[in-house]
Image (cartoon, rainbow, N blue to C red):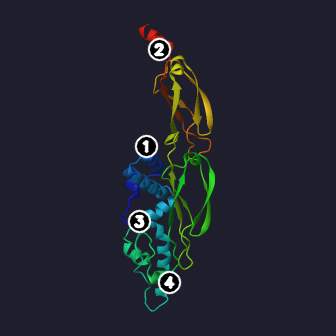
Amino acid sequence: MAYIDYYKILGVDKSATQDDIKKAYRKQARKLHPDLNPNDKEAEKHFKELNEANEVLSNPENRAKYDKYGENWKHGEEYEKAQQQQRQQYQGGNYGGGFSGADFGEGEDFSDFFQSMFGGAGGGSNRSSRGSASGKFKGQDVHAELNLNLKDAATTHQQTFDINGKKVRITIPAGVYDGQQIKLKGHGSPGINGGPSGDLYITFNINPDSNFERVGDDLKTKVTIDLYTAVLGGEVTVNTLDGSVNLKVKPGTQNGTTVRLKGKGFPVYKKDGHFGDLFATYDVKLPTDLTDKQKELFEQLKNS
């Protein structure tokens, strides 16, 4: 696995505060969000890297491990345990001054150790026999995808599915976005030698909706109105995610006019009672099959 500099991805230095990291993530997430970059594979890739970087650096414990072990941060605890066991083994034998050769200093390269212990920095299954026999190791992580329609993503609900032959039930918070990933600790593959199970990572795929386009926490929709309502004004029914509302149309409304319905957009993730806005764009439909009388009236308007 190639080393990924999470600080560089977020655009902050190593002395950044948690608030700095939060602000940097939000700023870039708005630019790279899949809803704003449809069919852009490069933006989608960077967005996933951004989420991964934020998941690590926004958690003080994970950040400390990352700062110490770099790309091997997930196996930092395994390294510490194995190192301790090796010290005990060598101190218990006829080796004199103990096993100091494995006492790497902070910031030094652990890659050789992890390569032999875990079969690579990514924690693959090709662990050496010594590593498997001498310690308990965490199982492999499992990655899964879950497809949701837009209305499902807008509602907190539960779903159950099978992972490794086990039923897993999760609660999906309202407001999840396309490409978002969550972690369920301990729901991955079983550990080695009684070690802890790996984690389950679920990536949400939000299916396109025929009525609404999502942009961040806002929604966009088109509303058809007839020419007479556009000219004279009136009332039109606008569909929202949770029902419909009646909206007044001003006289002389032009085709393409957009109005905002505050708080009628998408729920904000993990912020109860907070919603984006709904932007309704009018599509003025011209009349067809006019009668002679109606055509005459239009002629009169044209020449007036």
Distance, label 2 to label 1, CA atoms, is: 44 Å
Q: Relative to 256, is 168 on the left or the right?
A: right
- Which disc number belongs to residue 133? 4
SS at badge 3: helix
Residue for badge 2? 295
Query: Is 246 or 141 nearer to us in this picture?
Result: 246
Q: In the rendering, at what x and y percent does residue 71 appear? A: 41, 65
Q: Residue at x 49, y 55 (%)?
A: 58
Question: Which of the two labelled residues, at mark 2 and mark 1, occupies the earlier sequence position?
Answer: 1
Answer above or below: position of 133 versus 199.
below
Label 2 to label 4: alpha-carbon separation? 91 Å
Give the CA distance from mark 4 to mark 3: 24 Å
Query: What residue is pinned by disc 1?
Result: 36
Q: Residue at x 59, y 70 (%)?
A: 165
Q: Where is residue 284 shown, x and y percent of the image?
A: 48, 25
Q: Earlier in the sequence, mark 1 or mark 3?
A: 1
Q: Residues within 10 Å of mark 1 (few under 14, many from 20)?
A: some
- Name the residue furthest bottom: 94
In the picture, residue 96 is in which quadrant? bottom left
Quadrant for the N terminus in the image: bottom left
Q: Nearer the viewer, mark 2 or mark 1?
A: 2
